[in-house]
Amino acid sequence: MIPAGRVQKLTGLTVNQLREWSHRRDLVRPDVDADGPGRPALYSWQTVLLLRIAVVLRQRFRIELQAHKKLLHALHDLFSGVSFPALRGCVLALRAMEHGELLSEGTIRVGVNDPDTLFLHLDSHLDVLEAEFAPQDQSGQLPLFRAVQIR
């Protein structure tokens, strides 16, 4: 979990925008709410990924997020059930802006009867998050046991 200040750097949102989206409009809720002065709201990597996607939808596609509040909440649930490595090479398919679906990049297809779909690549967002959320081992200690053989 990371505090709101670091989330702003990862998403490009201002303090006011993050507060507006997280609390006032309830678009993307923090994982742990702020608890008074000095206890900022905390966000998981899934929530930060969702915020980055919301920024793309708002800035690149000019989509009004308030109209798609249910979709954003559903996407939060979708991401919470998936591990970080499993999202590599995936695309988020927003079907008619009503529900999201995770697809492998090699299996993207749109049938004649499928609703209009917006596809968003996730790898560029995951690269940013990986640098921020990767474990930081500052000890410099070598592993206790050396790998002798891998099968």
Image: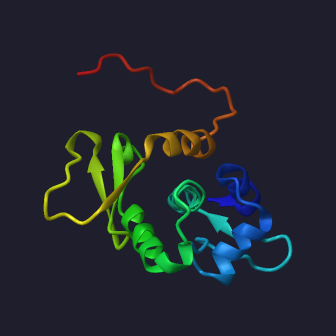
Q: Residue at position x 65%, y 54% from top?
A: 11
Q: Is residue 44 left or right of residue 113?
A: right
Quadrant of res 15: bottom right
Q: Residue 65 appears in which quarter of the rendering? A: bottom right
Where residue 66 appears, x then y in whole percent?
55, 78
Q: Which residue appears farthest toward the left when viewing the image?
A: 112
Kindly identify the residue that appears in the image at 32 percent across and 69 percent down.
96
Is 96 positioned to the left or the right of 84 in the image? left
The answer to whether residue 89 is above or below residue 46 is: above
Q: Residue at x 23, y 39 (%)?
A: 106
Relative to 107, say whether 113 is above or below: below
Side (left or right) of 18 relative to 127: right
Q: Percent x, y for residue 46? A: 50, 59
Residue sticking out furthest to the right: 37
**Residue 23: percent from left, percent from top:** 67, 80
Q: Is residue 40 visible?
A: no
User: Which colour style is shown?
Assistant: rainbow
How many discs mark residues in the rendered view?
0
Foreground pick, 150 / 98: 98
- Rendered view: 32 above or below 48: below
Which sits in the foreground, 75 or 113?
113
Q: Nearer the viewer, residue 146 or 60?
A: 60
- Tell me where residue 7 sits by quadrant: bottom right
Viewer can see residue 137: yes
Residue 56 in percent (x, y) is at 55, 55
User: Quadrant where the C terminus lies?
Assistant: top left
Q: Decide if residue 112 is on the left or right side of residue 20.
A: left
Residue at the location (14% across, 65% down)? 113
Q: Nearer the viewer, residue 151 or 45?
A: 45
- The quarter in which the N terminus is drawn is bottom right
